[in-house]
Image (spheres, rainbow, N blue to C red):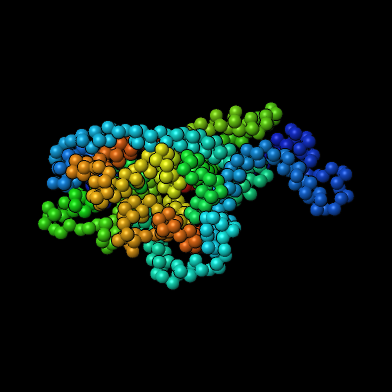
Amino acid sequence: MPNKASVALSDQTRPSALANAESPPAGVANKPKRRSFIRRELKHLKNNRELFLLSLPGLIYKLIFAYLPMVGLIIAFKNYRYDLGMFGSKWVGLDNFRFLFTTDTAWRITRNTVLYNAGYMLITTLGALLLAVLMNELKAKYTKFYQTALFLPHFLSWVLVGYIAYAFLNHSDGFINRLLISLGMEPISWYQDSGPWPVILIVVHLWKAIGFTTLIYFAGIMGISGDYYEAARIDGATKAQMALKITVPLLTPLIIIMLILSIGNMFRGDFGLHYFIPNNSGFLYSSTDVIDTYVYRALREVGNVSMSAAVGFYQSVVGFVLVLVANGIVRKINPDHSMW
Amino acid sequence: MQQARPIPRTLIHLFFVVLSLAMILPFLLVVAVSFTDEQALTQHGYQFWPSDFSLNAYRYMLDSPVILLRAYEVTLLITVVGTIVSLLITAMTAYVVSRPDYRYNRMTTFYVFFTMLFSGGLVPSYILVTQYLHLKDSLLALILPVLLSPFNIMVMKGFLSKLPFEVIESAKIDGAREFKIFFRIILPLSTPALATMGLLIAFAYWNEWFNAMLYIDDPNKVPLQLLLVRTLNSIEFITANSDFAQQLGIDLSHFPNNSARMAIAVLAGGPMLVVFPFFQRFFVKGLTVGSLKG
């Protein structure tokens, strides 16, 4: 730890700081212990004052935009009225939740959110690993081109992807339906038939996300020392063996970090994907609606703040527990791979 | 030394060429539709090659460019202001967290990182912004909610902890204050990291639509992405209610409904699609550093 040493060194150059850090001034020594602790801490604060001030804008920002809304979670237990405000509105206990869990809404949006996220995670990870391994077989000048092509959809917002999906799925003139007609088949009302949507959403997600994930894994592969492959080659290993026995095991930490991140986000539906691609069509809610789109609609289209807040509360809490559990499991298996 | 390859290279190339086409062709469909005559669209449907080439849709759009220009203006403004402020605060926070000798280092990291794991969610944020900060229909509502992401702080911290600590140390010996060290030494030394981070942030602001959907009703403050949302919805609305269209005096038979919609998508999304790929390596650098335990 060269850093520790240098800290000590830099402190020595400021004698006053060094003197204050460890031994309290003589006058304080006889005062009660608690008092001297506070004093010492204040001294520390003084020594770290400038760095603290540098971080202050960020701290205040997070206080307002991240920690204050946590207080706002109490809205879930209130009958919120705009005129009465957050603290003036009446407490209603679990009423907001009762409505939610007596209908099948909660089950539907939970199931959709979790299953879609699991599907995205699994398929994107496998696909990206495969592409990264294959890409590694090609010369750099070619991979550049393929990477750019794969990465292109990443630059689009979901709104624009919604336009592209519309060009394909539009009932009367869309590319797919015209193709079906020219093949002598019946056109499909894509925006009214919820059946095919799981597949459509997974394909669209894969289309947009695969380039990004592939690049992460490809960069990971680039970081693996060539010596391993050299040794394997001398021992007569095949390419497939090298991929399975060297590349994938060495990528495992990276894969696990990516997986924990997505498990942590298991309860956060991809709003853009699930709102714009199905064009917010009411016919499709049974198979496209996720927690986030439901909360948004309840707030902005239905205007039921309390219900929306209840679902949001449920999402925040369960999502948080999921992250803790996921990280706990990983830490149990291999502490090096866990996030904290 | 040559090993027998289980998959020949040409086959891999073929696979990637097909994949690349699958990535690019959907864009071309949108572009093609925007250049197709409306009549031809209803007759032949959407095709990858315009059966009847027409600039009508663009003429319609560019006849009254005010809305589009205004949207560009709003988006540019929030992107520039948002990126500068966000970059500065991100760098400041990340720098403090990256200093191993800072006493509240771990505390601050936890404070920031915790917001990534747990959040109040949509409704409390919405009420905070609209009822307490009174930012409804303010451009600040587009900038502030996404100003400081914990993820960006972690990525930036990863960059900054690679700087040699001796630099800070010797500056301190020379009697420099922390502010001076940060602004005069650390920031100039980390220009590449700042450029990468700035690009990621700018990209996020450019593509931001969620907060616009929540907080912007004023037609004068609509950013590009929200304009796209509105267009998708409103044209649909107009064609679905032909009575309504007649009241508005819109002659539906001449309005290039489908091609106009795609033309807006091209005009609003096209430029970025040309610009951002040039900076692709920055994106790659940013995301790899971030994912490899920043």
Image check: A22 left or right of A161? right
Report the residue at 58% width, 32% height from top.
Answer: B186
Image check: B132 left or right of B240? right
Report the residue at 72% width, 43% height from top.
Answer: A45
Res B93 quadrant in image: top right
Indicate the quadrant containing the N terminus of chain B: top left, top right, bottom left or bottom right. Answer: top left
Which residue is more in the foreground, B151 or A160? A160
Residue B47 point in image, percent of width and height: 18, 44
Q: Would residue A166 be visible to someone looking at this image?
A: no
Residue at the front extreme of this rendering: B247
Query: In the displayed structure, would residue A93 be above or below residue B129?
Result: below
Number of numbered markers: 0
Report the residue at 76% width, 42% height from top.
Answer: A43
Residue B280 point in image, percent of width and height: 38, 37
Residue B263 point in image, percent of width and height: 26, 39
Which residue is more in the foreground, A26 or A284? A284
Which residue is more in the foreground, A300 or A121? A300
Image check: A194 left or right of A172? right
